[in-house]
Image (spheres, rainbow, N blue to C red):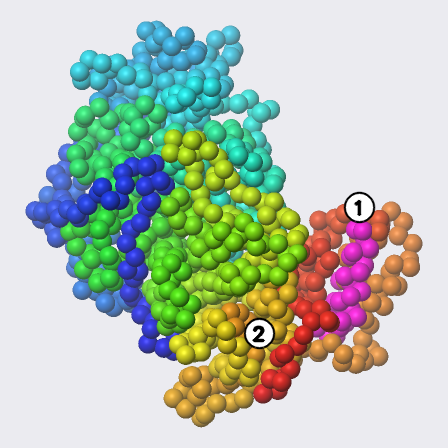
Amino acid sequence: MLLCCSSPLFLPRSSSNSKTRKDSISRGHAKPWSALTVNASRRLFAKHPFFNLHKLSLNWKKSEHNFAMPKVVREDQDMTTARKDVRLGIFDVDPSLEKFKDHFNYRLKKFEETKSLIEKFEGSLEEFSQGYMKFGFNREQDGIVYREWAPAAQEAQLIGDFNGWDGSNHRMERNEFGVWSIKIRDSGGNPSIPHNSRVKFRFKHGNGIWVDRIPAWIRYATVDPTRFAAPYDGVHWDPPPSERYVFKYPRPPKPEAPRIYEAHVGMSDSEQCVSTYREFADNVLPRIRANNYNTIQLMAVMEHSYYASFGYHVTNFFAGSSRSGTPEDLKYLVDKAHGLGLRVLMDVVHSHASNNPTDGLNGFDVGQSTQDSYFHTGERGYHKLWDSRLFNYANWEVLRFLLSNLRWWLDEFKFDGFRFDGVTSMLFHHHGIDMAFTGNYMEYFSEATDVDAVVYMMLVNQLVHNLLPDATVIAEDVSGMPALCRPVYEGGVGFDYRLAMAIPDKWIDILKNKADTEWSMKEIVWSLTNRRYTEKCVAYAESHDQAIVGDKTISFLLMDEEMYSGMSDLKPASPVIERGISLHKMIHLITMALGGEGYLNFMGNEFGHPEWIDFPREGNGWSYDKCRRQWSLVDTDHLRYKHMNAFDRAMNLLDDRYHILSSAKQVVSSTSEEDKVIAFERGDLVFVFNFHPENTYNGYKVGCDLPGKYRVALDSDAFEFGGHGRVGHDVDHFTSPEGIPGVPETNFNNRPNSFKVLSPARACVVYYKVDETLRQPGEETTESEITTKQLLLEKMKQPGGETTGSEITAKEVLPKASKVETIESPSEETIETVRQVLKDSEVNGTAERLSEETTEIARKVQKDHPGLVFEEDIVSDGMRDENESDMDHPTAGD
């Protein structure tokens, strides 16, 4: 997707220079930054400059269960390091990458060979990813079969409630690949291991000690809430058909661009507690839909024994967090989201695993070699900053485990994709620690690259998009690695989007360290547009990272303690509050409009949630006070939070109507440091941001591409957004040609046309080009045209029989009107009539509710005629009422 900028600020191939930053709180209080000075370790490579080669040690055989378990995927010693005869598609996209063709060809070759081995010994990548149908607990002919990969175990037993935790009669057998198995036959026609009963895997390792561990593939894990720091138990989850959740709604279609609402279920309640999946579905999902988001990104879904890790220290990969409910409750949440037209992404953590040996996967590591473990041994298997274990992505069973994990969440819970956490850590042996990425390609394609992990991510994206072509997979990467978001067949890693992680860091830096008069317009534009133009980004001003304890939300950085006393609309806003609300709106809109091809907001930040996030822990007396969302702030009508929420809703509607995020047209025409004004085009909209703290510009000239008439599409200064209503929304702005057509240097700011506007201080206004081929309100109707109003009135007079008034209106009248009426743009009278009929049908008792078919037809009419807004719409257009001022009229017609 081509993103262009008329200024020299835009460098399409450079990357973020932001350092990898993961707060110690978010990773489970691993270790303070100040205590860690971790130098990136360089590794010596014997054969290839890009990858640490290992010796081949495989004994390929089919197991008796018809699924192979070779230990490690390695290449033959005589394998050529690169393919000389292949020209990859990424070289056409970015010719600068061709100097690293050996690296790209090598990793693609390794990807293809790994995939071929999987196909040879497992049938296909898709079959390989169904490991959960073999491992863990599964029903097979009159019993339950349990399998576990634990090559370090010398003996093994299955224990649990079903046998009084005595495994002497339930010893397991081992095959040649280190897989232990046992079949527990049914008793009296009933499963011997009851549904919802506790189970564990007991094994003896090399020093003769027996240990109890939660099964690696367990689908549910719980803890005794009455015991402090109690260990988790694995739970056999196999509900009878009557108790299983049945999905009702299909997956929504993939949107042109994702508008993502990042959410944490546990902290989504206003009370000081852990919220549940069903409470979130019933209480929060409607809020998300009302604000016009189309995608939810759920954090902390995978089970994690330490709540304060924010879900990033995963202990049980196939189990949803039991704090918020059962697996069936989680399915209810996903299904309800789909019913509201919302896609659901899962924040998946495959970059590392919890170091907790009692509750998690690390408990299977008892000092064995890396070939027999999920993790690397020694320093390579431990993340010093996060205090967590690092996977060995070259291990066959690790590939099975992780790929199957993704398919489990897609198939069983109907997730629509993933946000991959910690991708930078996976990409490099140094994990991004103490690295300030500058965009130099040598930083990405050297011995520092972890090719095993890159190949794994290529397999991930190949699998996920094969299973679900409309899936969305996002990489949390701060490095800016080239080709990360290009297709695998081109030689890329295959992600759909990467998070634009440098943008929030820049906003925090500006807000903390610069006075308003010191803000650089060029620096802001640079930070927002500095991305690879052929790889999509999800932009955001703030996510959960920015609000973690030790930092603050943007609203709290702007307004701080005045938010406790100055947010009431019943008194005039203080200068601090007025500045804060104005800049909050501007920062979020310019980030959406200029920062990427997708947009993300963290739960509560849409209305300027104050303070910060702090999970219950010993350091805060196990308090939930800062681990919740105070929805009452935005629900209270006299508080100013409603203005920021309304603007967030209108921002998303702007993209819904004008498709700005998916538009390839992005041109910055002006970054005036003196005026503190940024003007640019995204799609066919013209954006004007005035960051000056005092100056309002009357008759300010802005460049544009298309000639014609422009009107206001969105105005942050509108009264309903907490503004002063200084901009007229009923004013026509006519363009004037600039210079010689086709000669940019003679144009105004390199744009062939211009028009003049009123640009208030600390405000942003978006303009759309009026389509003058459509008849506008006020134009006469010919005799041959039948107005919608006449048809509506005619039908409403007819006896309806058993048909309700609303069904007559939407099913019969509107289709007939659309066929007879020769105009495309409805008149004001038409709009008001349709709106009133629909309102009467719901409010005045004509019908209790509109049928689904009725609603769909009504929405079709609204889509065809964007000017028609039904009473049921809660979306604001930022329009003023007739009593509001109009300082903009002097610029009309300029």
Relative to 154, is 836 on the left or the right?
right
Whether 835 is among the magenta residues is yes
In this rendering, would 107 be left or right of 418? Answer: left
Instruction: State the residue at coordinates (48%, 90%).
Output: 738
Q: Please tell me which residue is depicted at 52% across the width and 33% down the height of the picture.
A: 273
Choose between 87 and 71: the one closer to the eye. 71
Number of numbered discs overlaid on the protein picture? 2
- Which residue is at a point 79% across and 70% down the rendered structure image? 829
- Residue 128 visible (yes or no): no
Residue 848: mark in rendering: 1
Residue 265 placement (x, y as % from top left): 50, 38
> Horizontal placement of 518 versus 658: left or right?
left
Q: Is residue 331 magenta?
A: no
Q: Residue furthest left?
A: 46
Task: Specify the principal SS of the magenta part.
Answer: helix
Q: Which residues are magenta?
A: 815-843
| Element assignment for label 2 | strand
Distance from label 1 to label 2 (Cα)?
Answer: 38 Å
Quadrant position of the C terminus in the picture: bottom right
Question: Residue 756 location in percent, x, y?
Answer: 55, 83
Discs 1/2, front:
2
Q: Position of residue 752 (x, y in %)?
A: 47, 86
Residue annotated with mark 2: 768
**Residue type of the residue flagged with mark 2:** Tyr
Residue shown at the point (50%, 49%) measured from the top left: 610
In the rendered view of the protein, which quadrant contains the N terminus? bottom left
Above or below residue 674? Residue 268 is above
- Nearest the camera: 253 or 577? 577
Q: Is residue 439 left or right of residue 846?
A: left
Q: Is residue 743 above or below residue 187?
A: below
Q: The disc labelled 1 sits on which kind of residue?
A: Glu
